[in-house]
Image (cartoon, rainbow, N blue to C red):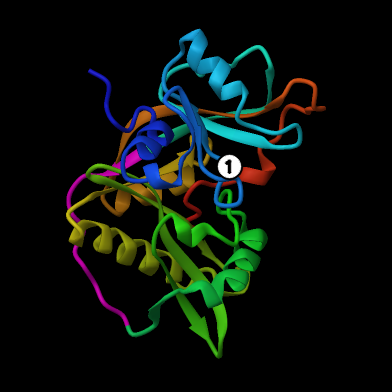
Amino acid sequence: MPHILDRPIWSALETAHADLAEGGKSARRYPPSIVPFAASADDTPESLDALEDLPSQEESMILVESGPIAIPAGLAVATEASVVQMIAERPHERISDSRIQPLTESDAADMLDLATLTKPGPFTLRAQSLGRFWGIKSEGRLLAMAGQRMRQTGFIELSGLCTHPDFQGRGLGTLLFRFVAGEIAASGDTAYLHAYAANTSAISLYKTHGFALRAEMNMRVVKRRSYRTAGGSTSNFQNFSGLK
């Protein structure tokens, strides 16, 4: 029986994030100004045609599913990669630390700057539309952050985890990872995350913090076929969760 996280983008846009969805019953996406995620309801011709209609000529969309990802004729694959989806094996303990503070809209530009520098995955000025974020600052400078991205009934994705290169190796990423996992558990939901399958060091670290492999996933970045595409690198989307 399919799991709600097998098609995480679709299930999020159908449930907890339905108010953010663009599209209709056959295909939906998040507003590109928030995150370039999209999904079809299934692989029927009707759904794939609807998926093809979502992007403009210049836009790209990211698709993530547990099985093979069907692409309509009018879209071309720009990049693709193997991804793992990991899920918390148990509820994480809620922790507190005076260094951690909630991030707000006033922090959006600093958050985007940090994400642009460290590349934890697709990130925009409107990332906080998806869920709450927390950070660690020093003298007003954002050193590290983490937060919540997709959510489904009973599940919240831990994402946007990154630390400024000048402050890596001090445990800030691990602290925020544990903190956000604890906040998700305290809300009554189960934390999960995504990482590239080739990022074995991050996967091993997630395992030490109580996350287990739930499923192997596929990711494709697609654009309209008439728009020039280039295959190969996933450099713009280096990590999904970003623990260093």
Question: Quarter holding the N terminus?
Answer: top left
Q: Left or right: where does residue 106 sit relative to residue 154?
A: right
The residue under the point 21% across, 51% down is 189
The residue under the point 62% across, 24% down is 53
Q: Quadrant of residue 232?
A: top right
Residue 80, above or below 91: above
Residue 36, above or below 180: above
Q: Position of residue 132 (x, y in %)?
A: 39, 64
Q: Residue furthest top?
A: 45
Within 10 Å of the Cα at label 1, are there few (<14), some (14-19), or many (20+) other Cα atoms? some
The residue under the point 50% across, 46% down is 240
Q: Position of residue 94 (x, y in %)?
A: 21, 67
Q: Does dot 1 land on a helix, a strand or a loop?
A: loop
The residue wearing badge 1 is 36
The residues colored magenta run: 86-97
Query: Is residue 20 visible in this depiction of the protein?
Result: yes
* Callout count: 1
